[in-house]
Amino acid sequence: MKNRVIKNKRKSLLTIILVACLSVVTALGISFSVKNSVNVNAYRDPGSAEVARVVAEEGIVVLRNENNALPFKSNMKIGGLGAGQDTAFIVGGGGSGYVHNGGNTIDPKTGMQNAASSGRIASYTAMGSATGTFDRVIYFISRTSTEGDDMKVADYYLNDVEKNDVNNLINKYGSSNVVIVLNIPTIIDTTWLIEKNVGAIVCMWLPGEQGGNALANVLTGAVTPSGKLADTWAKSYEDYITSYGTNDAVSHFASSVNVNYYEDIYVGYRYYETFDENYEKVNYEFGFGLSYTTFDIKTTGVNVNKNTGKIKVYVTVKNTGSTYSGKEVVQVYYSTPNDKIDSPAKQLIGFAKTKLLAPNESQNLTIDIDINEMSQFDDVGKIQKNAYVMQAGNYDLFVGNSVKDAGKHKVATYTVNTDLVIEQCGDINTHILKRLKSDGTYEYLDKEYYTVKEYGKKVFQTEDLESITTEREFHADTWFSGLTQGRLVRLLGNQTFRYRIIVEKAGTYNISFTMANGSESDYKDMFEIYVDSTPNDGVDNGVAQNISASLTAIKDAWQNWRTIYGNTVTFDKSGEYLLTFKCNAQCGDFDYFTIYNDKVAPAGETEISADTYTATNGVKQEACINGNLASGYRTAGNYTEHKITVEKAGKYYLSLDAVTPFKATENLADIYVNSEKAGTLKALRSSANPEQIKATTEAEPPAYKQASVDCWFTTRETSSIAVNLNAGENVIKILATSVDSLCNVKSIILRTTQKAFTYKNNTADYDFKSFADTSNPSGSTGWKGYKYLDVVEGKCTVEQFVRQFEVKELTALSMLQWARSESNSGTGGIGGVPGWNITSKDMYEFPYASTADGPAGQRFHFTNNDMPDGSDYKYATWFPCVTLLTATWDVDMAYTYGKQYAKEEQQTNNSIML
């Protein structure tokens, strides 16, 4: 027996991908027949074909093998049906996954013919139908995959032609003699095939240009399969928790490009381990894969070293078969306490793949586990917020050859006596309404973000949607600020999009829509609104919206936001709702919508949008990222009036959330209540220390927003005055008292108790200098003569080198430069100061790095004479897809693959794999 130590590889299947460009090439695999190259040049490394084949062999997964349907014997006549064996064979993905390999592809038909030529089978015949005499028949099922596309019903289920072909083969040759080969990028339905009792199901994924040879080697037993699934294959599509939106009858089958991860950490096998412990909903579990031989996995010991923080799991694997050599994957899982922080029932923490073991041969494996890798992330502070923690309790270890099998073999328990903080992390500003808990209930997280209050307003950004049908586009709202960007939903017509919200109290609320129409014609009857119903059977709670054209009104008409008022929405009870917008035709860009009312709370604080005024003189509505403003109080005599409803008469304290970017002034505005002057609001700070926000250099802001006008929208709360309000309707008037004393008002704030004045700043306290005034960052030294090689040779530090750069140079250094690709990949590159129009060109001698799509192979533009040697094109090797690479469960194989890939990158002057 030989010993091998395997380091812990938590999140380890991802590790296989991450290490793919490291280590050295090794001699791999068995001898095989390779098709003569159609196109050969210096950019396809001679060793790549063998590496591509061996990776494919190791990652092919045998899912089913009944009655010794596999492997094929040397005296067998084999037939193959389906275009997937040749003309419809899918080598790899589309888009950035597509590789021009010069026609150097071995399809399954060619691979099986090679096997016949070498005597591993008697013959191979490509069939046109279920006719002829064969010992076994293969049926090929292929599916494509590309970027920007989602799985459809026809991708997941077998179509009528495929089912008819399989039925014909079964009727002719018997179910046990039918072998199904899946040439697919991801999971498809296998339940129908299992019910048909086919002899074998083999998943070859998208296996790269040597896929045909690899498949033939596995089917004929020249290679014993050792691939294992990195996914869970459920019995039905509905058994995947993400197949439907939470409490939503809308299938996510390519019907929405937006998915909310309400299932939280219960993704993939973690979900089934926790909620389907008997695997009643699963055909093939995570880590599953059959072999032509059998193995015995025996855990011989577990050692805990608290000083090093390591656990060593000692395992002996023996090939207990009598005919075939093979490899086995040993998988280690752990479970955690579940008292304070929710956790899946089991999670993978380590694995190891054996060498090729002959019958009766054994191998000792040692799998190292880092104890801290069993920690859980505490994002709400049950032990410590935004930290990896280990809660007190028992941590069990399990060993097997799949997650299901491991559950039968608990090998050790590690006990933590007290809660521990392992690593403190920073905060990530994300929004999600709720998440699944291990008991099947949901925990509400950012409830405040999604809640419509009984009083005041709630702004919903349109990109925070639950789901949307067909096409949806996000777009950066750079019109507002160079420092802060918003997003929008670009509506292309005939879409349905939904928002999950929580309503604090039943009632009828106002709803407004902030949109833009940059076309030359008006948009009419744009959409309807439904509450908790689909458009087919729901009640329309809103009038279809209209928005006029604005093509000539502004520099960027598609960002000339207008708010549509005058609509209401009714909720008949408090609680969670699904708000549905159904587009009737072409619509405008949709930035956000606001649900609000004009009622003042009898206690606490109420915020009322200033843009919902009922009368005005000289003031208009203006949109910004986080809600609208009432803009134009700069002239004395300009005013707005606001009707509000007060439930309880009495004294209230009124302030404004406002901004004045010009000059400090003692008096901002006069406040009138029911036509009587209530008082004067002072400046943003006291008159003894007046506030002056730094102004832009422009006397007038342009009609459109740009980076230098942030000071027009950085609102702060004013000091307050006492006002007496009657029960029922009241009218509040905001009257500008002098030129430039007040500019924009975001909201009116009413409180029943006076709040200490803390100079509230509702956005960020930016330094409002224009970019032209910041040519050098703080601490910049300017040019000191340091070049890139000076850093490499230790003549200066990285910090000294970087401090020479101007801001525009740093920008050019890090941005993608499409026109500068030295490899003609079409994806540009980064580095090589400068980018454009910078006088310091080349003085830093910073190297330029070209990029290319990958990692299945480098993708280049197909243009003539693009190479220094005059050759027409750079052909690259088309390696297997990373799903197959992950299914090898072999980190050493990933190193081999990555190193070979890197050799071709080096030959084509590429440095970065995209």
Image (cartoon, grey):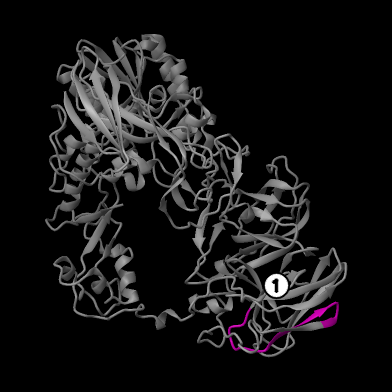
Q: Which residues are magenta?
A: 659-677
Residues 486 and 785: in front is 785
Q: Where is residue 787? Give x, y as percent.
A: 18, 73
Pick whichever, 56 or 247, lies toward us: 247
Q: Residue at x 13, y 56 (%)?
A: 870
Residue placed at 84% from the left, 75% from the top?
Answer: 724
Q: Is residue 800 visible?
A: yes
Q: Residue at position x 63%, y 37% from top? A: 249
Task: Check if residue 660 falls in the magenta segment.
Answer: yes
Task: Point out residue 333 in the picture as x, y percentages from the top left corner.
Answer: 38, 32
Q: Quadrant of residue 24?
A: top left
Determine crowd level at label 1: few under 14, some 14-19, many 20+ residues with C-alpha closer than 10 A. Answer: few
Identify whether 463 is placed above or below 354.
Answer: below
What kind of residue is marked 1? Lys
Image quadrant assignment for residue 856: top left
* Rendered location of residue 877, percent (x, y): 21, 42
Q: State left or right for residue 855 relative to residue 461.
A: left
Q: Position of residue 730 (x, y in %)?
A: 84, 71
Q: Which quadrant of the figure contains the N terminus?
A: top left
Q: Per the image, is 172 magenta?
A: no
Q: Quadrant of residue 731?
A: bottom right
